[in-house]
Image (tube, rainbow, N blue to C red):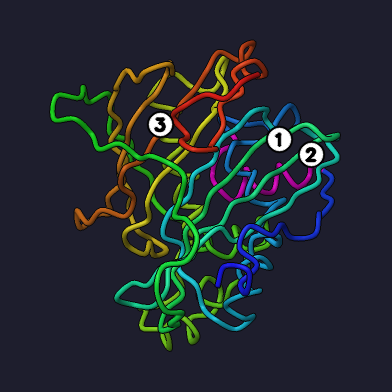
Amino acid sequence: MEDAYRLGAWSDRAPFRVDATAIASYVAATNGPDLFDGTTGAPPLFAIVPVFDCLKRAAQRVFGEDAPAVHLAHDLCVREPLRPGMHLDCRARLIGFEPSELGTTAHLHAQTRDAGVLVNEQYASLLFREVRKGGKVGVGPLVERPQRPPDAETLARVACRVDADQATRYAAASGDRAPIHVDDDVARSNGLPGVILHGMCTLALATQAVVRATGGSRGRTVERVSARFTRPVLPGDMLTTTVWARPMPRMTGTYLFETRNQRGERVLRRGIVSTVAAEEARDVGSGLSGSALVPQGR
């Protein structure tokens, strides 16, 4: 059965050249110019841009080109930040899927390399609505998202408003032009009140909230971002991200977070942002293989 779906088979490698213009576009689309100037390095969630087409193709092998998907969760592990001038090659693979009440949940894995050196890994879980593929096949996400302990210290609550044109700007900057993000009529035909914000844009906004709450980006590098998406975000929504401190084994500068809208509805849960001192970033070598909380060898 697994062979029939080519589980674990990598997509063709896709080249991507990182340039300052693409980074600046992403920074502007995610309201982050006070944290990232777009010339020295990219914000962590820019990592989705080079691998987006690879992830899409890996899913389409099994689910087809027209099957609508909803982003359920994402986990990014950064070995080295992306910078202008890098010549990347990216690949992705479907590692498993399982039935759910609404359809089928697919689990995908992506890698990005620069000159043969792994610079980041990503895991994504996508829900394909009303698509039935039978029982569980392959493996689920190889990551761990710990729950917030009841005694965790609240560091901050950071609010930001989603701009009216945020989804349109993010679509252009990221390459994700799925109709539910740019076309009100299509979004409504899918049971939504109108266009919704990309999950990765919501996660980028929340990650920036954590970075701002914990002292800014100077001298620190984000090495991991993870969260589950629990509710669509609409243009004009007011999002509040609550940040908690929690020391975690073998990892320093780790913060847990969740994000809610103006109605108190949770839109992101089990969020994690881990940072390291910038001079240590290349030596950390944290990986997602097995568990994203267990660093791999250097």
- Of the numbered discs 3 and 1, the one sitting upstream in the chain is 1
Q: Report the magenta residues as a range.
A: 18-33
Say if mark 3 contacts mark 1, CB within 8 Å.
no
Whether 204 is drawn above or below 10: the answer is above
- Of the numbered discs 1 and 2, the one sitting upstream in the chain is 2
Q: Is residue 256 left or right of residue 104?
A: left
Q: Position of residue 97 (x, y in %)?
A: 47, 66
- Of the numbered discs 3 and 2, the one sitting upstream in the chain is 2
Say if mark 1 contacts mark 2, CB within 8 Å.
yes
Q: Is residue 189 left or right of residue 54?
A: left
**Which disc is residue 77 wearing?**
none
Whether 91 is drawn above or below 57: the answer is above
Alpha carbon separation for disc pair 1 and 2: 6 Å
Looking at the rendered structure, the secondary structure element under dot 2 is helix
Looking at the rendered structure, the secondary structure element under dot 3 is helix
Query: How many marks overall?
Result: 3
Q: Which residue occupies the foreground of this view, 63 or 242?
A: 63
Q: Residue at 58%, 73% (x, y): give it.
A: 178
Instruction: Please state, as top left, top right, bottom left or bottom right, where the C terminus lies in the image.
Output: top right
Circle 2 crowding by C-alpha within 10 Å: few under 14, some 14–19, many from 20: some
Mark 1 residue type: Gly
Mark 2 residue type: Ala
Q: Position of residue 185 (x, y in %)?
A: 48, 87
**Which disc is residue 210 wearing?**
3
Q: Which residue occupies the foreground of this view, 30 or 49?
A: 49
Dominant SS in magenta: helix
The residue pinned by badge 2 equals 20
The residue pinned by badge 1 equals 38
Alpha carbon separation for disc pair 3 and 2: 24 Å
